[in-house]
């Protein structure tokens, strides 16, 4: 039985994919949970149109991201955090903190999913961060300084 997926389903497919599944699986699991709908000719045409629109939109976003990343290359960002005398941070730097710092610098469209950190940032000093979305990646330097208490 052919169905059109309404959501991403692990080990089956992505939203708007047209899949061939067993009729019992479709009737007893996919349809009652609104995970898929029957693949009628009209629904197939609509799903194909939506898929093409998503591809075009993804290409547009990829181009915008590429221009944003070109500005990002080789930049150095500074972040202050509480640390002890040995330079160890009381709390590791999170991706959320990095996203907030980048947003202040004018990189609002970078999300937590785009940031790659080799290992947790738990010490004061220079650290490499990677920004990656799809096959586009760039690295920058993050300098963590000790926050001075007044």
Image (cartoon, rainbow, N blue to C red):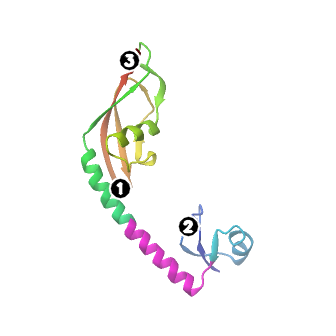
Nearest-to-viewer mark from 3 and 1: 3
Q: Looking at the magenta stretch, what is its main secondary structure?
A: helix
Dot placed on the residue nearer the N-terminal end, 3 or 2: 2
- Residue corresponding to mark 2: 13
Look at 41% across and 42% down and name the residue there: 116
Give above or below for 99 relative to 11. above
Q: CA distance from mark 3 to mark 1?
A: 39 Å
Q: Residue extending furthest top?
A: 85
Q: CA distance from mark 2 to mark 1?
A: 21 Å
Query: Residue lying furthest bottom in this view?
Result: 41
Q: Residue furthest front?
A: 150
- Which badge, 2 or 1, is on the more N-terminal residue? 2
Residue at image mark 1: 135
Q: Secondary structure at mark 3?
A: loop
Disc ID at residue 116: none
Neighbor class of circle 3 (other Cα within 10 Å; few <14, some 14-19, many 20+) is few
- Mark 2 packing: few (<14 Cα in 10 Å), some, or many (20+)? some
Vertical placement of residue 122 versus 7, above or below? above
Residue 94 % position (x, y) = 46, 35
Q: Which residues are magenta?
A: 38-57
Would you say residue 31 is visible in this rendering? yes
x%, y% of residue 12?
59, 66
Q: In terms of depth relative to the viewer, which is nearer, 81 or 66? A: 81
**Who comes first in sequence, dot 3 or dot 1?**
1
Q: Are marks 2 and 1 in contact (CB under 8 Å)?
A: no
State the image coordinates of residue 108 (x, y, percent, origin top left).
37, 47
Mark 3, mark 2: which one is toward the viewer? Answer: 3
Which quadrant is the N terminus positioned in? Answer: bottom right
Residue at 39% x, 64% y is 58
Q: Which residue is mark 3?
A: 148
């Amino acid at each position: 039985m052919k169905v059109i997926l309404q959501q991403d389903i692990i080990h089956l497919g992505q939203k708007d994919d047209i899949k061939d599944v067993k009729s019992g699986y479709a009737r007893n699991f996919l349809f009652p949970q609104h995970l898929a709908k029957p693949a009628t000719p009209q629904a197939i045409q609509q799903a194909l149109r939506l898929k093409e629109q998503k591809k075009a939109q993804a290409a547009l976003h990829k181009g915008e991201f590429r221009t944003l990343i070109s500005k990002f290359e080789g930049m150095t960002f500074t972040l202050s955090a509480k640390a002890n005398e040995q330079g160890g941070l009381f709390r590791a730097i999170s991706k959320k903190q990095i996203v907030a710092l980048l947003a202040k610098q004018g990189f609002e469209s970078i999300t937590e999913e785009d940031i790659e950190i080799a290992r947790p940032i738990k010490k004061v000093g220079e650290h490499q961060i990677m920004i990656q979305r799809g096959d586009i990646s760039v690295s920058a330097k993050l300098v963590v300084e000790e926050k001075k208490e007044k």
